[in-house]
Amino acid sequence: EGSTMSDPRRKTIDCRDHPSDSGCTLRLEGTEEEVLDAAVNHAITRHGHTANPELREQIRGLLKTGE
């Protein structure tokens, strides 16, 4: 098994890139759908966002590839 670093199939999102009043430092990494599902859930439960398709697409646009 090689390193997953720079794997274009893996996606990341880091709350530190999007500062909030809570000072959240969560970083998620995995497949696009894994990260997207977890990030949407996190945005709703931790940051008070409303669940809707627009939130999901907004977060999809913030995902980074293969870091």
Image: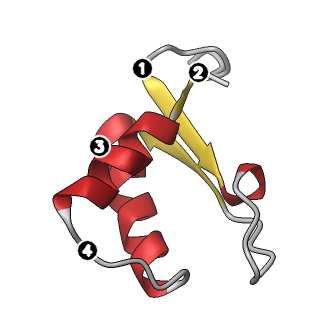
N-terminal label among 4 and 2: 4
Q: Are marks 1 and 4 in contact (CB under 8 Å)?
A: no
Q: Measure how far apart labels 2 and 1 are at the Cα level.
A: 7 Å
Give the residue drawn at x 68%, y 59%. Answer: 15
Mark 2 neighbour class, 10 Å CA radius: few under 14, some 14 to 19, many 20 or more? some
Compared across the picture, whether 66 is left or right of 67 comes to: left
Residue position for label 3: 33
**Secondary element type, mark 3:** helix
Residue 1: image location, x then y, percent: 56, 18
Quarter of the view holding residue 60: top left
Q: Nearer the viewer, residue 43 or 54?
A: 54
Q: Are marks 2 and 1 in contact (CB under 8 Å)?
A: yes
Q: Measure how far apart labels 4 and 2 are at the Cα level.
A: 27 Å
Give the residue drawn at x 29%, y 43%. Answer: 33
Residue 7: image location, x then y, percent: 54, 15
Q: Amino acid at mark 2?
A: Gly
Mark number, residue 66: 2
**Secondary element type, mark 1:** loop
Q: Residue furthest front?
A: 54
Mark number, residue 9: 1
